[in-house]
């Protein structure tokens, strides 16, 4: 593939969508360009570039489909949705009390083939008190028109349910080619094309007003820092005062979303547009497994410390690789991935047997779309700790995403074997808070 031609296409993509293609994702872009040219029957050149990058053209939309990452599934990052249900939803209900008609608007930005938007609809259908009194509007948007067509069809294969077996049994019915979501849920969700990087497109029209909830997860990790900051500002403007934002667990946080109130909930961060526009930091110390949660006021007080600051490494810290690794994790949590990578590499240079360092390298690589680098790093961690089921599980999922199903199955079988005899409720080590039941369920589903 002609490198100069691909670079010219990349420039158009970045300027119009905010998407970036570093070295770790260049192969994806090259494959997308080559496939699009082949489908058009064209060779790389000035004429082909004009056709391929014509705004709104069929070739442009096809290129976007080929060049974007559509990885999603039902109830992805379920722990975030649980935190929303426990913390944000009661605040929203308090704010709406006495206001008629009762309307709740949720926007799934970057919804790909629709699983996330439908997950929001199912969640709200289940947990809204006096559901019949509420007008619920859920809108899913994406830049990929082909993904939106799949979303509107509402038919999904088994892979989409890998963390939602209960919802699959309840809300879906078998049809040729997969399972279709029930009409009642489909009717709650509208889909439309929307470019988050377009400064003129703040709100999707189908939403009908400011959003009470915006979910935009694993979208901006593929964008430039400048585009990410611009998207964060537009999402802030799209929210009603007191509205909530959920972003992916490895996306930029503190500086990017500084206008929001960050709520720290059991290791998860939710963001709220303040009612009084004065940013505050709020922590909700809820123990895992708690079923009784106090309902917060929609105006949050008092301010407490936000994410812990990362001090420059002292001489003693530099001599201690585990301290360096702790600092690297804090930097990654704050979205400062370049600094986190440098600190993590320094820790590993001092102790090559630090398995947690390779795990963190994998998180950073995956956040940048470098699945090969993530696999390599987790593989090193698995070599150092072959008896850790979470490491085997993560490596299996990464291999599966790379299409290496034979290797993936081997790792997933190893994870299941290492879980043998452990109780379902046991919390496994790692930043994701995975339980034995969750790892076992996902692994065995993929192995069927």
Image: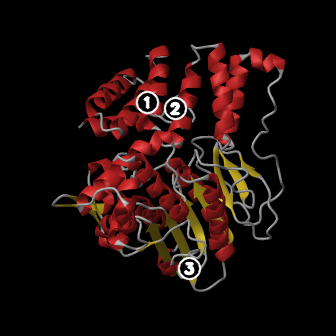
**Residue 433 can be seen in this image:** no
Hey, which quadrant is residue 308 in on the image? top right
In three-dimensional space, the C-alpha distance between marks 2 and 1, rounded to whole angstroms, equals 7 Å
Instruction: Count residues near mark 2 (Cα–Cα under 10 Å), then give few for <14, some for 14-19, many for 20+.
Output: many
Between marks 3 and 2, how big is the CA–CA gap? 42 Å
As drawn, 41 above or below 373: below
Which residue has dot 3 on it? Answer: 103
Q: Secondary structure at mark 1?
A: helix
Estimate the x, y position of residue 209 in percent, counting from the top left.
Answer: 58, 81
Residue 366, above or below 263? above
Give the left or right position of residue 149, taking residue 237 as reference.
left
Q: Residue shown at 51%/76% (left/top)?
A: 204
Q: Earlier in the sequence, mark 2 or mark 1?
A: 2
Q: Which marked residue is nearer to the observer: mark 3 or mark 1?
A: 1
x, y percent for residue 36: 30, 58
User: Which residue is disc 2 drawn over?
Assistant: 362
The mark lying in front, picked from 3 and 2, is 2
Could you tell me which secondary element the residue under label 2 belongs to? helix
The x and y percentages for residue 68 are 42, 55
Neighbourhood count class around disc 3 (C-alpha, 10 Å): few under 14, some 14–19, many 20 upward: some
Q: Residue at x 58, y 14 (%)?
A: 352
Label 3 sits on a secondary structure element that is strand
Tell me which residue sits at (41%, 30%) in the image: 395
User: Which sits in the foreground, 410 or 57?
Assistant: 57
């Amino acid at each position: 593939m002609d490198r100069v031609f691909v670079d010219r296409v990349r420039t158009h993509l970045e300027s119009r969508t905010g998407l970036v293609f570093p070295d770790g994702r260049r192969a994806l872009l090259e494959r997308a360009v080559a496939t699009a040219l082949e489908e058009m029957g064209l060779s790389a050149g000035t004429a082909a570039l004009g056709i391929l990058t014509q705004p709104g053209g069929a070739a442009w939309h096809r290129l976007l489909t080929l060049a974007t990452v559509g990885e999603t599934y039902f109830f992805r990052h379920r722990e975030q949705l649980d935190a929303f249900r426990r913390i944000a939803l009661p605040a929203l209900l308090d704010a709406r009390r006495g206001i008629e008609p009762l309307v709740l608007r949720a926007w799934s930005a970057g919804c790909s083939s629709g699983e996330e938007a439908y997950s929001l609809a199912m969640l709200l259908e289940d947990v809204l008190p006096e559901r019949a009194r509420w007008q619920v509007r859920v809108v899913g948007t994406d830049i990929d028109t082909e993904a939106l067509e799949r979303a509107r069809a509402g038919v999904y294969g088994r892979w989409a349910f890998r963390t939602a077996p209960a919802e699959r049994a309840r809300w879906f019915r078998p049809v040729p080619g997969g399972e279709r979501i029930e009409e009642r849920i489909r009717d709650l969700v509208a889909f439309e094309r929307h470019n988050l990087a377009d400064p003129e497109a703040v709100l999707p029209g189908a939403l009908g007003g400011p959003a009470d909830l915006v979910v935009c997860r694993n979208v901006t990790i593929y964008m430039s820092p400048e585009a990410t900051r611009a998207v964060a500002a537009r999402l802030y403007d799209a929210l009603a005062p007191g509205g909530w934002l959920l972003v992916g667990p490895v996306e930029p946080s503190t500086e990017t979303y500084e206008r929001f109130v960050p709520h720290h909930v059991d290791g998860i961060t939710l963001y709220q547009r303040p009612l009084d526009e004065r940013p505050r930091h709020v922590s909700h110390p809820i123990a895992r497994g708690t079923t009784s949660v106090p309902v917060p006021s929609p105006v949050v007080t008092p301010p407490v410390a936000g994410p812990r600051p990362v001090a420059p490494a002292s001489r003693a810290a530099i001599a201690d690789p585990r301290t360096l690794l702790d600092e690297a994790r804090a930097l990654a949590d704050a979205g400062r991935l370049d600094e986190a990578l440098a600190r993590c590499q320094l820790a590993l240079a001092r102790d090559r047997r630090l398995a947690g360092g390779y795990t963190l390298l994998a998180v950073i690589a995956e956040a940048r779309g470098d699945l090969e680098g993530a696999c390599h790093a987790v593989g090193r961690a698995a070599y150092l700790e072959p008896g850790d089921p979470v490491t085997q599980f993560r490596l299996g999922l990464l291999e599966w995403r790379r299409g290496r199903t034979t290797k993936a199955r081997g790792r997933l079988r190893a994870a299941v074997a290492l879980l043998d005899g452990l109780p379902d409720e046991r919390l496994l080590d790692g930043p994701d808070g995975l339980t034995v039941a969750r790892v076992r369920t996902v692994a065995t589903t993929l192995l069927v």
